[in-house]
Amino acid sequence: YEGMLGSGYEGAREIQKRLTNTLGWSATSGQVDNWVYEDANATYMEDDEMRERLMETNPSSFRKMVATMLEANGRGYWDTSEENLERLRQLYQEVEDKIEGVE
Protein backbone atom coordinates (compact mmCIF):
# COMPACT_ATOMS: atom_id res chain seq x y z
CA TYR A 1 0.00 0.00 0.00
CA GLU A 2 2.75 2.43 0.92
CA GLY A 3 4.10 2.85 -2.59
CA MET A 4 0.67 3.62 -3.95
CA LEU A 5 0.44 6.98 -2.29
CA GLY A 6 3.48 8.24 -4.09
CA SER A 7 1.18 9.02 -6.97
CA GLY A 8 -1.19 11.13 -4.88
CA TYR A 9 -4.51 11.42 -6.66
CA GLU A 10 -4.29 8.09 -8.46
CA GLY A 11 -3.00 6.42 -5.32
CA ALA A 12 -6.07 7.48 -3.38
CA ARG A 13 -8.29 6.14 -6.12
CA GLU A 14 -6.50 2.79 -6.16
CA ILE A 15 -6.87 2.40 -2.42
CA GLN A 16 -10.54 3.29 -2.65
CA LYS A 17 -11.08 0.72 -5.42
CA ARG A 18 -9.39 -1.94 -3.32
CA LEU A 19 -11.65 -1.21 -0.40
CA THR A 20 -14.70 -1.35 -2.63
CA ASN A 21 -13.53 -4.71 -3.98
CA THR A 22 -12.97 -5.94 -0.45
CA LEU A 23 -16.53 -5.03 0.44
CA GLY A 24 -17.77 -6.79 -2.70
CA TRP A 25 -15.77 -9.88 -1.77
CA SER A 26 -17.26 -9.81 1.74
CA ALA A 27 -20.71 -9.67 0.19
CA THR A 28 -20.23 -12.52 -2.26
CA SER A 29 -18.00 -14.85 -0.30
CA GLY A 30 -18.09 -13.87 3.34
CA GLN A 31 -14.38 -14.71 3.26
CA VAL A 32 -12.93 -11.43 4.45
CA ASP A 33 -11.47 -11.42 7.94
CA ASN A 34 -12.30 -8.62 10.34
CA TRP A 35 -8.65 -7.60 10.58
CA VAL A 36 -8.63 -6.60 6.91
CA TYR A 37 -11.02 -3.77 7.71
CA GLU A 38 -9.35 -3.02 11.04
CA ASP A 39 -6.08 -2.73 9.20
CA ALA A 40 -7.49 -0.39 6.55
CA ASN A 41 -9.03 1.73 9.28
CA ALA A 42 -5.75 1.93 11.19
CA THR A 43 -3.77 2.72 8.06
CA TYR A 44 -6.01 5.32 6.43
CA MET A 45 -8.41 6.68 9.02
CA GLU A 46 -6.49 6.68 12.30
CA ASP A 47 -3.18 7.88 10.90
CA ASP A 48 -3.41 11.67 10.87
CA GLU A 49 -0.80 12.25 8.22
CA MET A 50 -2.17 9.63 5.85
CA ARG A 51 -5.74 10.80 6.33
CA GLU A 52 -4.85 14.44 5.66
CA ARG A 53 -2.97 13.44 2.54
CA LEU A 54 -5.84 11.38 1.16
CA MET A 55 -8.34 14.07 1.96
CA GLU A 56 -6.19 16.74 0.32
CA THR A 57 -5.22 14.85 -2.82
CA ASN A 58 -8.54 13.23 -3.62
CA PRO A 59 -11.46 14.14 -1.37
CA SER A 60 -14.07 12.28 -3.41
CA SER A 61 -12.13 9.01 -3.28
CA PHE A 62 -11.59 9.55 0.41
CA ARG A 63 -15.30 10.09 0.93
CA LYS A 64 -16.00 6.79 -0.84
CA MET A 65 -13.46 5.07 1.37
CA VAL A 66 -15.15 6.34 4.51
CA ALA A 67 -18.57 5.38 3.16
CA THR A 68 -17.30 1.89 2.30
CA MET A 69 -15.94 1.38 5.80
CA LEU A 70 -19.24 2.47 7.33
CA GLU A 71 -21.12 0.21 4.97
CA ALA A 72 -18.91 -2.75 5.85
CA ASN A 73 -19.83 -2.20 9.46
CA GLY A 74 -23.50 -1.63 8.71
CA ARG A 75 -23.70 -4.91 6.84
CA GLY A 76 -22.01 -6.79 9.65
CA TYR A 77 -18.72 -7.53 7.83
CA TRP A 78 -16.65 -5.36 10.11
CA ASP A 79 -16.96 -5.43 13.85
CA THR A 80 -15.24 -2.44 15.44
CA SER A 81 -15.36 0.05 18.29
CA GLU A 82 -17.97 2.78 18.58
CA GLU A 83 -15.05 5.20 18.72
CA ASN A 84 -13.89 4.16 15.24
CA LEU A 85 -17.38 4.49 13.82
CA GLU A 86 -17.80 7.90 15.39
CA ARG A 87 -14.53 9.05 13.84
CA LEU A 88 -15.67 7.80 10.43
CA ARG A 89 -18.98 9.61 10.69
CA GLN A 90 -17.19 12.84 11.57
CA LEU A 91 -14.70 12.36 8.74
CA TYR A 92 -17.54 11.83 6.32
CA GLN A 93 -19.08 15.12 7.38
CA GLU A 94 -15.70 16.84 7.14
CA VAL A 95 -14.89 15.61 3.65
CA GLU A 96 -18.45 16.31 2.52
CA ASP A 97 -18.04 19.94 3.59
CA LYS A 98 -14.67 20.09 1.89
CA ILE A 99 -16.07 18.82 -1.41
CA GLU A 100 -18.97 21.26 -1.25
CA GLY A 101 -16.57 24.07 -0.40
CA VAL A 102 -18.07 24.83 2.97
CA GLU A 103 -15.46 26.27 5.30
Image (spheres, rainbow, N blue to C red):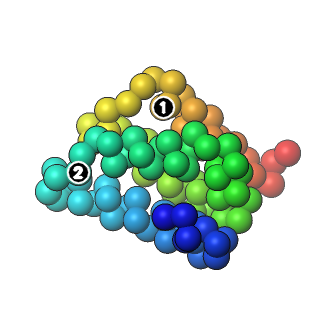
Most extreme residue toward the top, as rendered?
82
Residue sitting at 70 percent across and 57 percent down? 53
Inspect the image, locate mark 1, and give the three-letter code of the amino acid beneath it: Leu
Report x, y in % for residue 26.
Answer: 23, 53
78 left or right of 10? left
- Please name the amino acid that badge 2 sits on: Val
- Which quarter of the image is occupied by the C terminus? top right
Local SS, label 2: loop
Category of crowding for the residue at label 1, using alpha-carbon neighbours closer than 10 angstroms: few (below 14), some (14–19), many (at least 20): some
Q: Is 1 placed left or right of 22 in the picture? A: right
Does the rendering let one see residue 91?
yes
Image quarter of residue 19: bottom left
Q: Which comes sooner in the sequence, label 2 or label 1? A: 2
Taking the spot 34% from the left edge, 48% from the top edge, the residue there is: 36
> Relative to 34, does residue 29 appear above or below in the rendering?
below
Hey, which quadrant is residue 4 in on the image?
bottom right
Residue 30 rendering spot, x and y as whole percentages: 16, 50
Residue at which label 1 appears: 85
Tell me, for residue 40, which label it has, or none.
none
Residue 17 position (above or below residue 22) = below
The local crowd at label 2, few if under 14, some if 14 to 19, many if 20 or more residues have their Cα within 10 Å, is some
Residue at horizontal 60%, vertical 68%? 5
In the shown orientation, is residue 69 left or right of residue 24? right
Q: Is residue 89 above or below residue 97?
A: above
x%, y% of residue 74?
34, 37
Picture quadrant of residue 20? bottom left
Pointers 2 and 1 in contact (C-beta within 8 Å): no
- Work out whether 60 lies above or below 26: below
Q: Residue at x 48, y 44 (%)?
A: 41
Q: Which residue is mark 2?
A: 32
